Image (cartoon, helix red, strand yellow):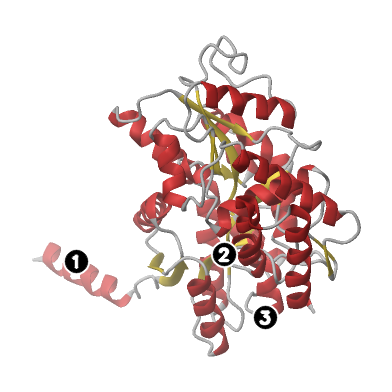
Amino acid sequence: MQLRKLLAAGAIALMAIPAMAQENVTWWDFLSGGDGVRMKALIARFNKEHTDIKITSTTLEWGIPFYTKVRTSVAVGQGPDVMTYHLSRLPLGLDEGVLDQLTDEDIKNAGVTKDSFFPASIKAASSDDGKLYAVPLDIHSLVLYYNKTLLAGSKFLDAGGKLTGINNLKDFEEALAFAKQKGSVSPISYATGDDGGVYRVFYTLLRQQGGELISGKEVLAGDNLQKAAKSIEVMTKWATNGWQPEQAAYEASVALFTSGKSAFMLNGVWEVPTLVDQEKKGTLGFKWGAVQVPNLMGTQTTWADSHAFAIPAKNKMSPEKRKAVMTVIGWMEKNSLAWAEAGHIPAYKPVAESAEFKKMEPNATYSALANSASYDPRSPIAGVASPAYDAALNIISPAIHGYAEPMAAAEQVKQDLQDKLR
């Protein structure tokens, strides 16, 4: 009887103790495909490991629809607690006033420091006066994929099957000519009829010449106009010589490479899982590798962007909710090795420099590009789904297919973007 009374008293006492409050963190992202699968797995892991915080996630349509939704939600004060954000869109986000500044206390609550990220990514996540508005998750860049089987027996592969001997544009074009002679349908494949595909190749060639697309309030200032024309001229030559596909949509450009019809592919790191999966299934039919885009034009750099985490402006979260949000962000950074499986380079250096990541191929091979990456111009008309991308599709793509001279196209890009910048 005494034991029964004690148990009953204990049960009453436990009922009197208030349950630990669980912070519900509303999350928006634009991640689909392999990226979406990996992020959903990370969210599930976080929720399983945390009883005091729960992420409730929603995936929205990538590009303009996502950023329009963010802008609208902030205007009415109904944005999420945290969202994914392209750092190339940060200047426009600041211009629109949709991003909340992250304080030193926020970063402390995330359990990270600014110094623990690659400098280029932190700069891209900050305003011109150094205030932080996002936390970079990765660095994703254009890389050069290559077909080892097709290049076998050439001077462009070393004994270990690694790409070699491409130190400038002349070397690269020699490799393209070799591939054409070997029967390659399109020696270099990229999305020649797609805004992102054309823009990333153009911008890489421009930046490798030391060129600037936008300087302050001027588009293609000074000799940048000539450098832009040179970039378009190179891409046009690849088309004229039959080295690249004609008006290829994104999916078609990938298929050319995965079917073995292209010796090289200029595409983002996000296609690494496609090749890895096909290789595992035994459906690829050739051996492959991926490296950072070689120094073709004089400077070792390539187009890059970052997925990042940001907090919308005009949020009404409590200090406890904000701390929970930063806990979520910090956990994602520290567990970003799983995210790197999508081909990305972790922006958080402790993960990028870990022994585990150094074993991850081909990521580890091209990871050095994190130190020389060229982000889009810090301008509200640049970045993902921007007027700069529109110009690539509407002006540069027709030019490389012979519908305009390179200099005329560069001048049109200058005029078109300058009108939008005013």
Element at badge 2?
strand
Where residue 292 sits, quadrant-wise, is: top right
User: As drawn, which residue projects farthest toward the left?
Assistant: 1
Q: Provide the residue designation for mark 1.
A: 6
Instruction: Give the residue number, with chain letter if any, for mark 2.
Output: 85
Nearer to us in this view, 88 or 359: 88
The amino acid marked with disc number 3 is Gly
Residue type marked 2: Tyr
Between the residue at mark 3 and the residue at mark 1, the CA separation in whole angstroms equals 59 Å
Toward the right, the furthest residue is 222
Local crowd size for mark 2, using a 10 Å CA cut-off: few (<14), some (14–19), many (≥20): many
Q: Position of residue 144 (x, y in %)?
A: 58, 35
> Is 207 situated above or below 126?
above
Give the mark nearer the N terminus: 1 vs 2: 1
Residue drawn at point x = 46 percent, y = 38 percent? 272
Kind of residue at disc 1: Leu
| Residue 392 percent location from the top left of the image | 63, 60
Above or below for 138 versus 62: above
Identify the residue at horizontal 37%, vertical 61% (top origin). 51
Horizontally, residue 98 falls left or right of residue 417, namely left
Q: Which residue is mark 3?
A: 97
Q: Nearer the viewer, residue 304 or 408?
A: 408
Mark 1–mark 2 distance (CA, rounded to whole Å): 55 Å
- Crowding at dot 3, Cα within 10 Å, few <14 / some 14-19 / many 20+, comes out as some
Q: Position of residue 279 (x, y in %)?
A: 36, 29
Please tell me which of labels 3 and 1 falls first in the chain: 1
Quarter-of-image position of residue 300: top right
Q: Residue at x 41, y 30 (%)?
A: 260
